[in-house]
Image (cartoon, coloured by chain):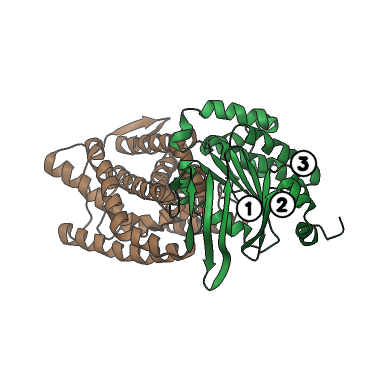
Chain colours: A green, B brown
Amino acid sequence: MLELSGLTVRYGKHLAVEGVSLTVEKGEVVVVLGANGAGKSSTLKAVAGMIPAASGEVRMNGARLTGLPAHALTGKGLALVPEGRGIVGQMTVEENLRLGATPPRARASEEETLAQVFEIFPRLAERRGQIARTMSGGEQQMVAVGRAMMSKPDFLLLDEPSLGLAPIVVGDLFKALARVRATGVGLLIVEQNVKISLRHADRGYLLEAGRITGAGTAEELMTDDAVQSAFLGGSA
Amino acid sequence: MLEHVVNGLVLGGTYALVAMGLTIQYGIARIMNLSFGDTIIAACFATWLMFTGLALSPILALVVLVPAGYALSLVVYRFIMKPLVDRAPDEGALEVDSILVTFGLLFVIQGVLLTLFGGGYTSYSYLNSPVNVLGTTVAANRLLALALSLAIGAALVVVLFRTRWGMTLRAVALAPQSAPLYGIDTNRAARTAFAIGGALACTGGVVLSMFQTFTATGGVVFTMKALIVVILGGKGSVPGAIVAGLLLGLVETFVAAYIDPGLTLAAVYTVFLALLLVRPNGLFGKA
């Protein structure tokens, strides 16, 4: 289980994330919904060790992760696909994927995992020799997710994977993520795209101005008035 | 004509060899090392000492000095560079700080060399017999120098592009922000890159000393030349350093032979400026 308790992030005097607590089980898809500036990215970055947490803690399978540097967290089985994807644009698709298997825990099963990634994203198998930055946005997002899978994570964090992608591409991406989940990985996704992310999630949380203001199963949230008014324009 | 090509390649080969170390330090560790040329000169003197004092061949000096350069660079990184890395808020700040501190280091190394060896020109004679290459005569030591430069360059390219370890170093050079997400320890990569750069500076020193005279104060010239090659080739690119180094050597030799030996430096800077106008990030630089 991935467990955030009382996580707080500050930028100088500005409180970006205030006491966020949530849990993700293995094999579960949890989505955090929030508008721009609600603290979604900051939460994920703090969990992944990209920025320091002011207080609170993160535990994975009981072990305390707070304060560890980003590369060490990847090594322990917590992978982040950041906003902007964070791939190495000048390397080929295959180099990006193989580089993803850098943590020792991922080495022994590198070939197996690569085959699994190619099965979920056949497009990447076709394009394995292509320089990553010359691909479309959707394909680059596949590289980013594939690279994260290569590190053999127990939990995968995704920062707005739908951002900048055409609706049909977003649909395909979430279908692929469902297959990633089926391998036993727990997914924590932060999103603004409420409809599609709730359709593929088990549970969700609402994040407003750095605080969790609501939680529930995906079905509950889809019909929740607060969600309706905050994200879907109230009339849906 | 052919004679100038051979001489140009020999000269360019040493430029390439020297620039590879600097580009690795700059591209991966983000340290602009102004004391690089003085490290080369220190290695020149160390080779000379071993050759004249202990009758050790420069090839054996290579075996001793390359690991020594690696180890000493690790010490320099730990005690001089790491504090800068830790306090730098961003890459730009580290670059400025590293320029200042290595500028100081330049004078420390130079001062030690001046005290130990004085300010005179030094050289020794090793494999100084003429060899016939495609109808022109070249000194054997120069040919050996070219062969060593090309072999080391090729080995480095293979390691960087064909091994997992090289791939992680390249990833840190290309995408320093993303590398930790791949599970790469960027601090360790920077330390290693700085040490590889130091080992390459020592290699360059040994190779250069085989056929060139050197002085304790001559380091700056090598740093400047290497810097031009690094920027021409593209920051952090080893293939770029090799191509740009050879190009520079050929340009210098041809200008000296056909136009005027006094114009070599002017020609170098003309090529430098012209290429940067067309490709601001260098031949192999990232866009």
* Mark 1 residue type: Glu
* Mark 2 residue type: Leu
N-terminal label among 2 and 1: 1
Task: Give the left or right position of residue A51, taking residue B19 as reference.
Answer: right
Task: Give the residue at the far left of this rendering.
Answer: B53
In 3D space, how far apart are the residues under numbered discs 2 and 1 (Cα atoms)? 8 Å
User: Do discs 1 and 3 belong to a common subunit?
Assistant: yes
Instruction: In this rendered view, identify the residue nearer to me: B246 or A152.
Output: A152
Question: Does the rendering let one see residue B238?
Answer: no
Residue A165 in picture, x, y percent from top left:
75, 48
User: Do discs 3 and 2 belong to a common subunit?
Assistant: yes
Tell me the SS state at disc 2.
loop
Task: Give the left or right position of residue B261, taking residue A132 as reference.
Answer: left
The picture quadrant where one finds residue B218 is: bottom left
Instruction: In this rendered view, identify the residue nearer to me: B121 or A119.
Output: A119
> Which numbered dot is residue A83?
1
Mark 3 vs mark 2: in front? 3
N-terminal label among 3 and 2: 2
Chain of the residue under label 3: A
Task: Give the left or right position of residue B254, taking residue A167 as reference.
Answer: left
Which residue corresponds to mark 2?
Answer: A163
User: Do discs 2 and 1 belong to a common subunit?
Assistant: yes
Which residue corresponds to mark 3?
Answer: A171
- Which residue is pictured at 40% across the width and 41% down the height? B10
The reply to whether dot 1 and dot 3 touch (C-beta < 8 Å) is no
